[in-house]
Image: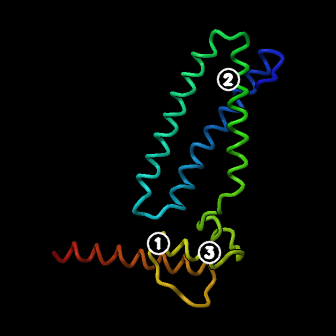
Amino acid sequence: LFFAPNIHQLLFGRVVVGFAIAVSGIADVAYLHEIAPKEFRGSIVSVNEACISLGFLLAFILAVWFNNVDGGWRHMLGISGWLAAIQFVGMMFMPESPVWLAQQQQQKGRDREIALTQIIYDGEEEEDISFSDAVLLSDEQHQQKQDDVNNNNVIR
């Protein structure tokens, strides 16, 4: 967007960036939900939303500051491009979520991912099972806990 030579390319770029922001707004919350331990999920997602609001505030302050600079809108878009590039590089080092790995049935890093699943689902450690079996086992244990809670509520 910084290099857009005319208004039409600038508007097209804004539409593309708008769709990308919408997709990332959904994907980051889903990723945080999958990777976070269940006792921290709500607070982690809330902190994420607070950081997004802080980003809006900082963008507004920069917009006011660049308002009196010649070609200030190009500088604002250039800064956002650099921040997006830094975020892209940082995303390369993020671990895959256990749910995604189970869906893809990947076996690489099986021990690390099973450990993550143990943290997330409070499952029991099992010997010589695949990652997808561990996730299924954790889901069965979760369902059993839900059934126990429902049965206790009926008995009382």
Q: Residues within 10 Å of mark 3 (few under 14, many from 20)?
A: few
Above or below 35: residue 102: below
53 lies above or below 137: above
The circle on residue 97 is: none
Name the mark nearer the viewer: 2 or 1: 2
In percent of width and height, residue 38 lies at 43, 63
| Residue located 73% across and 41% down the image | 85
Residue 141 image position (x, y, % from top left): 43, 79
Residues at marks 2 and 1 touching, judged by CB atoms closer than 8 Å: no
Q: CA distance from mark 2 to mark 1?
A: 43 Å
Residue 121's disc number: 1
Query: What is the secondary structure assignment of the residue under circle 3?
Result: helix
Q: Which residue is under mark 2?
A: 76
Mark 1 lies on a secondary structure that is: helix
Alpha carbon of mark 2 to alpha carbon of mark 3: how far? 41 Å
- What's the residue type where badge 2 is placed? Met
Callout 1 environment at 10 Å: few (<14), some (14 to 19), or many (20+)?
some
Residue shown at 65% from the left, 58% from the top: 94
From the viewer's side, name the closer residue of 156 and 24.
24
Q: Residue at x 51, y 85 (%)?
A: 125
Please, is residue 47 above or below residue 106 in the view? above
Side of 98 relative to 8 (left or right): left
User: Which numbered dot is residue 112?
Assistant: 3
Give amino acid for label 1. Answer: Tyr
The answer to whether 99 appears left or right of 104 in the picture is: left
State the SS at label 2.
helix
Tell me which label, 1 or 3, sits earlier in the chain. 3
Between residue 37 and residue 107, name the one nearer to us.
37
The quarter holding residue 109 reads: bottom right
